[in-house]
Amino acid sequence: MAPNTSEDHALAGHTVPPPSRREEILAFVVLAVLIWPILAVGVVGGYGFLVWMFQLIYGPPGPPAH
């Protein structure tokens, strides 16, 4: 690990300004339009794949065939 320098101590008290309204709107649009729909499709598709694989191994639901 690198030793602490005087620059590290000077930056330690630095605060990050709050995001601007434009940055917040851009972050919302990226989340709402890109990330969440892709994540939702992935979750539903993953669940469907899991059910499909389960049924390949254990058979379809319903009463057992005689």
Image: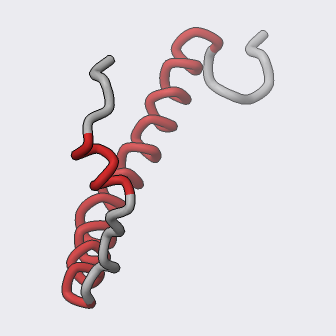
In screen coordinates, is 53 left or right of 18? right
In screen coordinates, is 54 left or right of 15? right
Q: Quadrant of the N terminus?
A: top left
Residue 13 lies in what quarter of the image?
A: bottom left
Relative to 50, does residue 31 appear above or below in the rendering? below
| Image point (44%, 29%), residue name | 49
Residue 45 lies in what quarter of the image?
A: top left
| Image point (24%, 63%), residue name | 34
* Residue 39 in picture, x, y percent from top left: 37, 51
Q: Quadrant of the C terminus?
A: top right
Q: How is colour applied across the structure in the image?
A: secondary structure
How many marks on residues? 0
In screen coordinates, is 24 left or right of 53? left
* Residue 21 in picture, x, y percent from top left: 26, 90
In screen coordinates, is 16 left or right of 62? left
| Image point (28%, 54%), residue name | 10
Q: Residue furthest bottom?
A: 21
* Residue 7 in picture, x, y percent from top left: 22, 46
| Image point (74%, 29%), residue name | 62
- Nearest the viewer among 22 and 18 is 18
- Nearest the viewer among 57 and 41 is 41
